[in-house]
Image (cartoon, grey):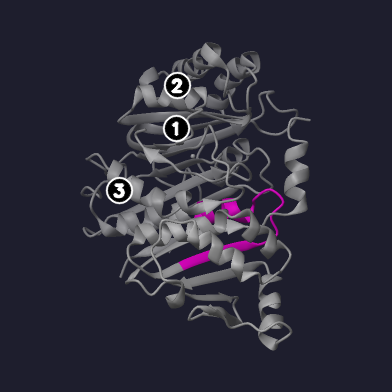
Amino acid sequence: MTMLQVIDGGVTSPVGFQASGIHCGIKRERPDLCVIFSERPARCAIAYTQNKVRAAPIEIMMRKDPKQLQAIIVNSGNANALTGNKGLYDAKEMCSLTADALKINEELVGVASTGVISRFLPMGPISSGIPKAVEALARGRNADIDAAKAIMTTDTKLKEAACTVTLKDGTKVTIGGITKGSGMIAPNMKVLHATTLSFITTDAVVTKNVNAKWQEMMDQSFNVISVDGDQSTNDICMLMANGMAGGTAADTDPAFWEGIKFVAQSLAKQVVVDGEGATKLIEVKVVEAKTSREARSAARAIISSNLVKTAIFGADPNFGRILAALGNSEAAFKIEDVKLTVSDDDISVVLFEKGSPTMIPGSQSEKDARKILSGKRIAVELALGMGHSSGEAWGCDLSYDYVKINADYTT
């Protein structure tokens, strides 16, 4: 059994990590500049957005293709996307200024931005803010919270998670992370090639290239969430492992990756719960699929459907929308073998089975279904009858407030 313990912590919980979050002047009043720092260089793994329009910081990071990082500089309020050569220069300058303030090599500094697209960064406030952010670096809960707040845009809640795990050799390692995301959320991040910005730190020893395993973590967390179906120009998720807990390498230790998955999934679910205008969490599980890839494809197709999202917002048990979304996925199935169930913590209702609806209009089952869909958490399960694989995805409803928030975003 995995020795995983959830702790009250964040990005500085692992040994050797510090962070800060300050207001430098990009936004009017809220914190807008974050630094995450490791006392020694950390092995890293990074996943990037697959949107063909990539923001300048994403381009800079992909060109660097770092194997190690010691610091990350992040700004909110401005995405530095669609800003041409000046945007690339400014992103590189953020790395350079951070490296100078920390007295480390510029190649060890990562950069990320989030906010309004197609506006140049206000480099005056950023240039003067970076030394202040470095000076404010600290460890502990206040530093965790400051950093988490500084990367927020339309988020209404800061998002962090942390746990400890015991490895096979008895070493206890800590994993912590922060993320931001509320709108333009439908990540499809790939390693080496997400608007969620996510930063996960650990003091575990990692000695090898773990890109394949990091991709697996993305495919089971951030890549199976959707708020609005729009993939950002700025999505990025970084892992930093500085090895300061000691012990043997955790590269292939199942307990270590169970801890990473827990933090990544916790952060991903916090994003959809805080989706712009969201009132409900939708958890979709697909079972009896041919492969886990097909199961995840089906689950993601359902939580990405605006018709499904709006039906759930209105507590309308319109199961046809769910099955139509299933039909748009990669999953193989025969409709006569599909079973569709909705549930909450108290009630479960089968809506469709053996090729026919099982919910009769005006019946108690319809009343129960509407009650389930009126709650804050809705579980949807589809059994495909094709195999033994399963997959999950998480999303939120689409409300009137989503339109209002995004209609007024730049004003």
- Identify the residue at image location x=63%, y=46%: 182
Camera-side mark, 1 or 3: 3
Which class describes the residues within 10 Å of circle 1: few (<14), some (14-19), or many (20+)?
A: many
- Real-space Cα separation, disc 3 to disc 2, in angstroms: 31 Å
Viewer-proximal residue among 84 and 325:
325
Q: Looking at the image, is mark 3 or mark 2 earlier in the sequence? A: 2
Label number found at residue 37: 1
- Identify the residue at image location x=52%, y=45%: 178
- Please say if the residues under marks 1 and 2 sit with CB atoms less than 8 Å apart: yes
Identity, as a three-letter code, of the amino acid under mark 2: Leu
Say which element carries label 3: helix
**134 sits to left or right of 126:** left
Which residue is identified by label 2?
102
- Please say if the residues under marks 3 and 2 sit with CB atoms less than 8 Å apart: no
Give the mark count: 3
117 in relation to 307, above or below = above
Which class describes the residues within 10 Å of circle 3: few (<14), some (14-19), or many (20+)?
A: some
Q: Position of residue 359 (x, y in %)?
A: 63, 82
Is the C terminus in the top left, top right, bottom left or bottom right quadrant?
A: top right
Is the N terminus in the top left, top right, bottom left or bottom right quadrant?
A: bottom left
Write the start and end of the magenta stretch as one range. 266-285
Residue 98 belongs to the span the image colors magenta: no
Say which element carries label 2: helix
Viewer-proximal residue among 391 and 240:
391
Identity, as a three-letter code, of the amino acid under mark 1: Phe
Which residue is identified by label 3?
213
**100 sits to left or right of 142:** left
Q: Looking at the image, is mark 1 or mark 3 earlier in the sequence? A: 1
